[in-house]
Image (spheres, rainbow, N blue to C red):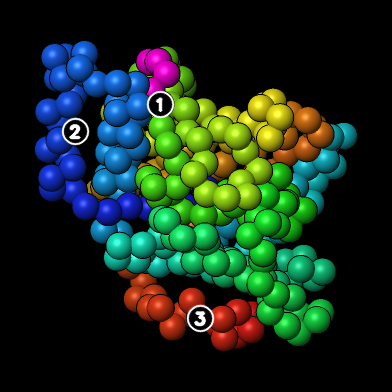
Amino acid sequence: MTLTTLLKNLGAISLVFAVASTPIAQAQQSDAEKGLAIAKERKIRDEGWGDSQAEASMILRTSSGQEIERKMRLLTLEMENDGDKGLTVFDQPADVKGTAFLNYSHALEPDEQWMYLPALKRVKRIASKSKSGPFMGSEFAFEDLSSFEVEKFSYKYLRDEKINGQDAFVLEQVPAYEFSGYTKMLAWIDKEHYRAQKIEFYDRKDSLLKTLTMHDYKQYLDKYWRPMLMKMVNHQNGKSTDLVTHELTFRTGLTEEDFSQASLKRAR
């Protein structure tokens, strides 16, 4: 989710990474250079999918195990030379029905985010200083919903490690954007497909705050991998949120008009 992962420019960068993957080149790379190369390859492998629509559920779980399920639709549009656009519309239960969230991810500029609140019948812009706050009472923060853009972080390769029976790189990612709620993230990226398997989030005191794990990956259009289950666990308050994808379709014909501020009010 994030909630969705998204990417650009294969040719030259792939060639550079392929060369950098040789033993001699790796020995000459710094940990920062190797981390950046891995992040670029992760992004490159998810280029060209266009747009997608999904039916999903968000399951909020308290520390005592009580659950609330929210059903929603997720629309995403891949943008050229920028981050992606996303629209989330809540359909159930009744107390959140019609609530809509619009997100414009950017690589270098601050993300733009808006919420439509049907009870107030108005669109509210999410301030940059508020993006570390919880999204709809979940353990996902507003900033977690941005598409993955390489320029949002600085990187450091830490080590190789197995996860879920797969060989993986472990990277440190430090947010480059202002007002992040995190000092750093540790990401486990599998070596075969460059998919995120786990991400640890560290708070402003540099303590482990949350862990996101990805499960049940499926491949679409013979190229693009998406997890059908994302589990975010908050280690400090004992709460967790599952994001479950039920149906996912690509290249459905969405355009930028479907992601305007006016579309927030129409998205019922």
**SS for tag 2?**
helix
Q: Mainly helix, strand or loop, the magenta region?
A: strand
Furthest residue toward right: 64
Residue marked by disc 3 = 260
The numbered mark, 3 or 1, whose residue comes first in the sequence reads: 1
Asked whether residue 108 is in view, the answer is yes
Between 70 and 154, the residue placed more toward the observer is 154
Q: Amino acid at mark 2?
A: Phe
Query: Residue 186: percent from the left, percent from the top?
Result: 51, 28
Q: Residues within 10 Å of mark 3 (few under 14, many from 20)?
A: some
Query: Residue 254: percent from the left, percent from the top?
Result: 39, 75
The structure residue drawn at horizontal position 34% and vertical position 21%, both measured from the top left corner, is 31
Residue marked by disc 2 = 17
The image quadrant where one finds the C terminus is bottom right
Q: Residues within 10 Å of mark 2 (few under 14, many from 20)?
A: some
**SS for tag 3?**
loop
In this image, 266 relative to 133: left or right? left
Query: Residue 37: percent from the left, percent from the top?
Result: 28, 33
Find the distance from the CA under tag 2 to the CA under tag 3. 37 Å
- Closer to the camera: disc 3 or disc 1? 1
Magenta segment range? Answer: 156-160
Q: Amino acid at mark 3?
A: Ser
